[in-house]
Image: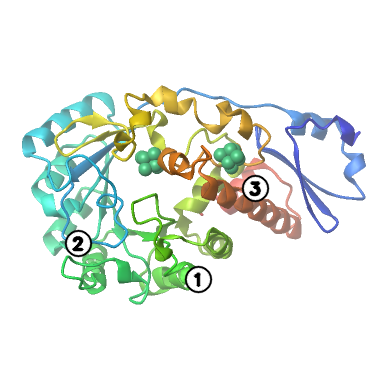
Amino acid sequence: MIQILSSRVKRFERGNDIVLYNPFSQQLFFTDRDDIERIGEEDLMRLNSLDVRMEPPKLRKVRVEATFGCDSACDYCLVYGNPLEQLHTAMSMETARGIIGFFNQNVREGSMMIIGGEPLTNWDVVEYLIDNIEGNAQLFTNAIKMSPKKAEFLARKGSRVYVSLDGMRRHNTHRRYHNGRETFDDTLKGYKMLQEAGISPSITCLSTQTNVYDLDEIFDFFVEELGCRAMGISIPHHTEFSHLPFMQTDIHEYTSQMAGIFKKARRGGIFVDQIAKRLAPIIQGYFRPYACKIAGEQVTFYPDGTQTLCTKLDTLPDFNGIKAEDLFNKTPYFDLTCQECEAISTCGGGCFWDAYHDGSGHDIRDCYFTRQMLNVFLWDISDFLKDRGMPITRDNLRKEYSVC
Ligand code: SF4
Ligand code: SF4
């Protein structure tokens, strides 16, 4: 009977145990070598189903480069490490007014990501944007120029705040001022001001070779010492510094550390962005169409108010005039080389910019990470639910895996 499983159904083996998984419908079946021939008709039909709803994305997010100026000069900066247009310029209040007009008319109830450069160096514009947005604001900052008054404002407005920090003092050495002094103490001061104002800041941590072997310890530091409940732990995008040894994050080590972090995050109810985005399709039962939101969900505004998709892609002649729908059509669902991949519905295709620089057309580090994590997720689900005698239902999955 097992022969009539379609090629969409992927088989994962560990000792005697087998997981059958259809990434197109997020159907799972746990069995073993002794029982695999005895799968019932109903389970076979469910496993073979093709349940993909590929909806064209709607605009839901606006990214605002509030300034391309910064009070820091981090060694790995994605902005200064690429020949972006408008470097060192800041958004004017008049431009910010135009963006609010656009947002409140076209993206109402969506979210605005305010970033840069360092947005706090253009606080009047940031304050204006947050004060006038009809939707949610997310502020990405190094928190150096945070003050109790700004923190109180952000708390009152219900803004989400993401603070950049790469771990403990000894890991945060790439985040520096222009004079070379490290920013660690000042960022922590800003982070604590946010907490004192009642905000629970998220942390955005970049994993380089400097901290990749300590990510597990860094996770504990963020949670236990800093009281952090949500974080991102990402690897560097391509920059002109990518050839430097510290920028070449060992993707195998990163993945292994993230696999350990996943187990802790699940137990502690901690949100880790890079895990949650790949796990959610399995738990919630959907196909993740794209990883980068510029495939239709997000537009970006330069400091002068010019609208684009990605300031990095704008530096590549190959992407001149590219539209969101062109990028949507490059995502795994439409990519023949992805059709047989077990991670087709959880990866989203990674970053278009990194895929271009990889030369393979795929974001290969992201492919590796996503595929490995899929294994980790499936065996964790198998062990966790089986140990408790819980059937694999969508409700049980949501109950046990909804946070991380
Ligand atoms: S992991 Fe890589 S090969 Fe697999 S679907 Fe994603 S982009 Fe394609
Ligand atoms: S293509 Fe890459 S660098 Fe550009 S917005 Fe998307 S994720 Fe960011």
Q: Earlier in the sequence, mark 1 or mark 2?
A: 2
Ligand 1's image quarter is top right
Label disc, if present, on residue 298 of the rendered structure: none
User: Could you tell me which residue is drawn at 16 percent across and 60 percent down?
Assistant: 71
Picture quadrant of residue 148? bottom left
Is 107 displayed left or right of 96 in the figure?
right
**Residue 62 placement (x, y as % from top left):** 28, 35
Q: CA distance from mark 1 to mark 2?
A: 25 Å
1 or 3: mark nearer the eye? 1
Identified by mark 2, the residue type is Ser
Q: CA distance from mark 1 to mark 3?
A: 34 Å
Q: Which residue is mark 2?
A: 72
Q: Residues within 10 Å of mark 1 (few under 14, many from 20)?
A: some
Quadrant including the N terminus: top right
Secondary structure beneath dot 3 equals helix
Q: Earlier in the sequence, mark 2 or mark 3?
A: 2
Picture quadrant of residue 379? bottom right
Label disc, if present, on residue 213 of the rendered structure: 1
Picture quadrant of residue 27? top right
**Residue 126 placement (x, y as % from top left):** 15, 46
Q: Residues within 10 Å of mark 2 (few under 14, many from 20)?
A: many
Secondary structure beneath dot 1 equals helix
**Residue 274 placement (x, y as % from top left):** 48, 52
Q: Earlier in the sequence, mark 1 or mark 3?
A: 1
Q: Residues within 10 Å of mark 3 (few under 14, many from 20)?
A: some
Q: Which residue is mark 3?
A: 396
From where the camera sits, is residue 403 visible?
no
Q: Measured along the vertical axis of the image, is residue 87 above or below residue 94?
A: below
Identified by mark 3, the residue type is Asn
In this picture the colour scheme is rainbow
Q: CA distance from mark 2 to mark 3?
A: 46 Å
2 or 3: mark nearer the eye? 2
